[in-house]
Each structure stands twice: as C-alpha cells, then as structure tokens.
C-alpha cells in the first residue's frame, strides 16, 4: 500500500496524495471517497473498493483507528487517509483537495453518521442539542461534502451513495432522532437524483449489521446474531458495478445470486423494532 497517511491539515492532505496524483496523469484508476471508514460498513466498503482497483480518500475522527483500519489493503493500493470531523468545513475541504490530487472523484460514499444518545431516548425526551448534532452529522455534513464534489462527479458521470436505515421509513420506538435525520437525508438525495442527470444518486439501507453503532443502540444486549458488515459488500459492489438507476435500495434485495446466504446473514424479515 502506498501513500497512506492520517493527517488533519490542508497542507498535509496535499502532501499525502500529491505524489500519487502527479504520477498518474492519465487517471488510470477510479477514485472513491468513503467517510467514516475506520470501522464497520465504511471499513468494509473501503477494503472492497481498494480490491476493485479504486484509489481511496477515507476519513474518520480517530486517526490511529483509521490507519489500523486501512491495514491489510492490496500492496498496490493508493489511499489518502485523513483524520478529522466531517462537520468541519476545513476538513471537508481537505477531503476535496485529496480527491483532486488523486485525479478527481468518481464515487462518494456518505457513510459517516452518529446514532445520538445511548440508550436511545423517546422523542418526548430527546435532548434538542443532541438532535441538532444528529442532523449536523447525518444530514448537513454529507450534503455539504456532496456539493463540493458534485462538479467533478458530473464531469466524470460519477455517483453519490448515502448509507441510510429503515429507521428513516419505519416507526421504531426510540429511533426518532436518528430516523428523522436519515429521513431528511433520504429526501434530499431523492430530490438531488431528480435534479442531476449525469450523476447516479443512491441511498442504501444495509439492514441490521454487527457494528459498534448498532451495539450502542442496544447497550448490554448480545448482537452477535447480526451479520458482519462484510456480508453485504456484494450488494454494494453490484449497485456500483452495474451503475443501477438512482433510487433507494435495500442491500438484501441487491445480493447477487449465490450470496443470498452470506455467513451470519439474517432472514429477510427483520425483528420488530430493530432497524
């Protein structure tokens, strides 16, 4: 793996990726940006995209965790790993510069998000400051990053993929704050898809996964029956590889033939009250 760094400032971002960008005048590889890539689904998708030949720009708040998450990539992988907060405009600008230094973005995966308070509070008791923070991370930040990258994505016929949840469309007790934020993100993406001709705009519900966020949603419970994030990667690969129409998708419906019974996968019917 080459050019893998965890950095925080704009100068460092350019240094981390400049050599690779200058060496590739012909843009031999596609470039993908994955936010929230230090663990869970973001990490799994970053690894899959690197295996598929993408150059990567990845981020997370914890630089050490991000470096560790990018270990084990293919030997020829080119990755710019930037530590920072996705709600920080200067960090988003760093990500934008890093993608341009690698040749320009072809794919943006808005994966970074926050659950909010744990245990999950009822809407009637939801702290409003926490609700504002949830909207900032889950809605404003990904839309701001999308706006930054859209000109290049239009030019390349690229795609924006935002990770969502069935909590955006179903009423689960305790999930009002997170679900409302994801619903807002979904509708913004829905409208964006109607406005953008050259860019695919996808929103994908990966289903229940064995992640830290899901554990935070059910503190003290055993979630070992949930599938690992890697189990749904074939669904994302199919969506991206086949360049399906803009829209909302469930990972369970996208699984290629032969991958429907991925290790640890749950039946199609989800347990009531568990997004």
Image (cartoon, grey):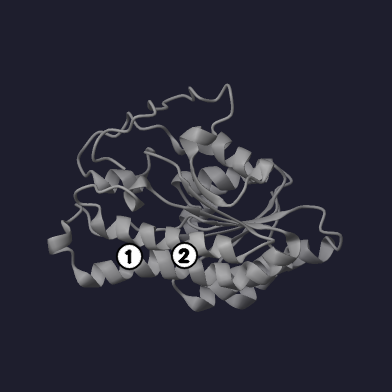
Is residue 169 shown to the viewer in this render? yes
Screen quadrant of the C terminus: top left
Q: Is residue 254 above or below residue 85?
A: above
Q: Secondary structure at mark 1?
A: helix
Pinpoint residue 60: horizontal percent, then vertical percent: 48, 60
Q: Secondary structure at mark 2?
A: helix
Number of numbered labels in the structure image: 2
The residue most toward the left is 125
Q: Mark 1 sits on what residue?
A: 134
Pinpoint residue 255: horizontal percent, then vertical percent: 54, 31
Q: Residue at x 48, y 52 (%)?
A: 38
> Would you say 115 lies left or right of 198 here?
left
Pinpoint residue 223: horizontal percent, then vertical percent: 29, 34
Q: Nearer the viewer, mark 1 or mark 2?
A: 2
Q: Which callout, 1 or 2, points at the residue further toward the start of the chain?
A: 1
Marks 1/2: CA–CA distance: 16 Å
Q: Which mark is residue 211?
A: none
Q: Mark 2 sits on what residue?
A: 188
Q: Residue at x 31, y 55 (%)?
A: 179
* Front-lying residue, 115 or 3: 115
* Front-lying residue, 244 or 42: 244
Pinpoint residue 216: horizontal percent, then vertical percent: 27, 48
Q: Residue at x 32, y 28 (%)?
A: 225
> Would you say 83 lies left or right of 31 here?
left
Q: Residue at x 45, y 48 (%)?
A: 39
Crowding near the residue tagged with mark 2, few <14, some 14–19, many ≥20 C-alpha atoms within 10 Å: few
């Amino acid at each position: 793996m080459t050019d893998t760094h965890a950095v925080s400032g704009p100068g460092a971002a350019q240094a981390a990726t400049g050599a690779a960008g200058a060496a590739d005048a012909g843009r031999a590889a596609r470039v993908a940006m994955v936010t929230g890539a230090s663990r869970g689904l973001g990490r799994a998708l970053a690894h899959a995209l690197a295996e598929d030949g993408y150059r990567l720009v990845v981020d997370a708040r914890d630089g050490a965790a991000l470096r560790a998450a990018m270990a084990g990539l293919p030997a020829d992988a080119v990755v710019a790993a930037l530590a920072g907060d996705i709600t920080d405009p200067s960090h988003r600008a760093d990500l934008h510069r890093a993608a341009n230094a690698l040749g320009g973005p072809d794919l943006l995966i808005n994966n970074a998000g926050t659950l909010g308070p744990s245990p999950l509070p009822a809407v009637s008791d939801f702290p409003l400051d926490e609700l504002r923070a949830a909207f900032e991370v889950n809605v404003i930040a990904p839309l701001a990053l999308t706006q930054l990258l859209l000109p290049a994505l239009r030019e390349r016929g690229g795609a924006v993929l935002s990770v969502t949840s069935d909590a955006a469309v179903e009423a689960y007790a305790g999930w009002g704050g997170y679900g409302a934020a994801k619903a807002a993100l979904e509708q913004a993406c829905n409208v964006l898809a109607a406005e953008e001709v050259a860019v695919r705009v996808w929103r994908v519900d990966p289903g229940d996964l064995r992640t830290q966020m899901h554990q935070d949603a059910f503190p003290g419970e055993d979630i070992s029956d949930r599938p690992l994030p890697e189990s749904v990667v074939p669904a994302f690969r199919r969506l991206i590889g086949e360049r399906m129409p803009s829209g909302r998708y469930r990972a369970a419906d996208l699984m290629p033939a032969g991958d429907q019974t991925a290790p640890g996968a749950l039946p199609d019917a989800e347990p009531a009250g568990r997004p």
